[in-house]
Amino acid sequence: MEDIDRRIVGLLSSEGRSSFTDLARETGLSVSAVHQRVRRLERRGVIRGYTALVDHDALGLPLTAFISIKPIDPAAPDDAPERLAHLTAIEACHSVAGDESYILKVRVASPGELETLLQEIRTAAGVSTRTTVVLSTPFEHRPVAAAPGEPPAAEVS
Amino acid sequence: MEDIDRRIVGLLSSEGRSSFTDLARETGLSVSAVHQRVRRLERRGVIRGYTALVDHDALGLPLTAFISIKPIDPAAPDDAPERLAHLTAIEACHSVAGDESYILKVRVASPGELETLLQEIRTAAGVSTRTTVVLSTPFEHRPVAAAPGEPPAAEVS
DNA sequence: TATGAAAGCGCGAATGG
DNA sequence: CCATTCGCGCTTTCATA
């Protein structure tokens, strides 16, 4: 993972369908060189895939919310992610430190659907919920910066 | 926005670099038909762009956190998003209902960087912060479902 | 909005510096 | 690890219905 790879990742992170020809131009390498690097980044899992960024309003899912969940029985085994995976309204699931155990990000069509979803979450995972409704999203999915502060210098890793 | 468009969006949402040839095969349309539909979806903003999904661990940004912010002076004009936009560690910014005003999602290299970032956020936007550290992420960026419950029936829009 | 054909270019593999 | 070459496949546009 060196500087030119970070650059490629940055470019693909802001333009996921860039052609190898474009990437070559913008990095100063030949097409086959970028090609090899991109394939290697994919194989090593640095690039995990590609996705279209969609306007959820236009798709009829204008309501976004963060739902924090906490087990009702703290002694029960914690398999909330598996129990919730079938609910396609849940876009992301993060295990977190703090008072609650997971934060879910969900997209639904209406308050009514949110209510239904909350009940499904509570019964499927045996949890209580705390919901924060998103009013608007100034920005999201910003591309990774080409160079953060400094790549971790000398770490054994 | 009809059914075949949702299907295309779903496909591009799980495979952002799918060729038009593949999309045509999977939808049963001709190549140029999908081509037109995809371009129209892009023009109308239903598809806002494409991005590579990256492994932040591999990029040297293994620490993810949600930071909720609240203005110190509630009377001051609320322009936090503009004031925070230059901080590239902030991946997303959502305006939310509830006790706090925004939820930020950030990616940093270390606890030390998180501390620095928190100070920058507080001074740049005049806010207090509450931070929730992400321990792991069972899933994220799940593709939009082809058909939610039902597309909003008869809305004037 | 759909299709099919034609032109151009990008992709991907193989070879060699 | 990078550059060059080349055949095939994909993208893109246009004419047409």
Image (spheres, coloured by chain):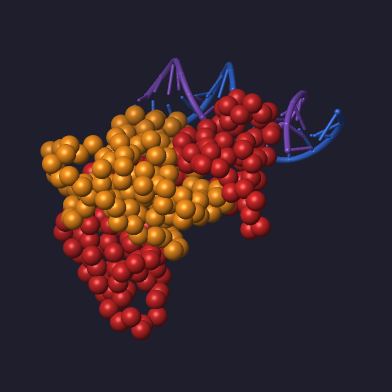
Chain colours: A red, B orange, C blue, D purple
Asked if residue D11 is positioned above or below residue A117 in the image, the reply reads above
In this view of the protein, which residue sits in the foreground, A126 or B62? B62
- Which image quadrant is residue A80 in? bottom left
Residue B146 visible, this orientation: no
Residue at the image position 65 percent from the left and 51 percent from the top = A154
Residue at the image position 47 percent from the left and 41 percent from the top = A144
Residue at the image position 57 percent from the left and 40 percent from the top = A6
Image location (x, y in percent) of residue A104: 33, 60
- Which image quadrant is residue C14 in? top right
Asked if residue A82 is positioned above or below residue A41 in the image, the reply reads below
Residue B99 lies left or right of residue A52; in this view the side is left
Quarter of the image with the C terminus of chain B is top left
Residue B98 visible, this orientation: yes
Image location (x, y in percent) of residue B122: 31, 46
In this view of the protein, which residue sits in the foreground, A25 or A155? A155
Image location (x, y in percent) of residue D4: 76, 23
Residue A55 lies left or right of residue A156; in this view the side is left
Quarter of the image with the N terminus of chain B is top left
Image location (x, y in percent) of residue C2: 39, 34
Asked if residue B122 is positioned above or below residue A156 in the image, the reply reads above
Residue B101 lies left or right of residue A75; in this view the side is left
Residue A146 lies left or right of residue A91; in this view the side is right
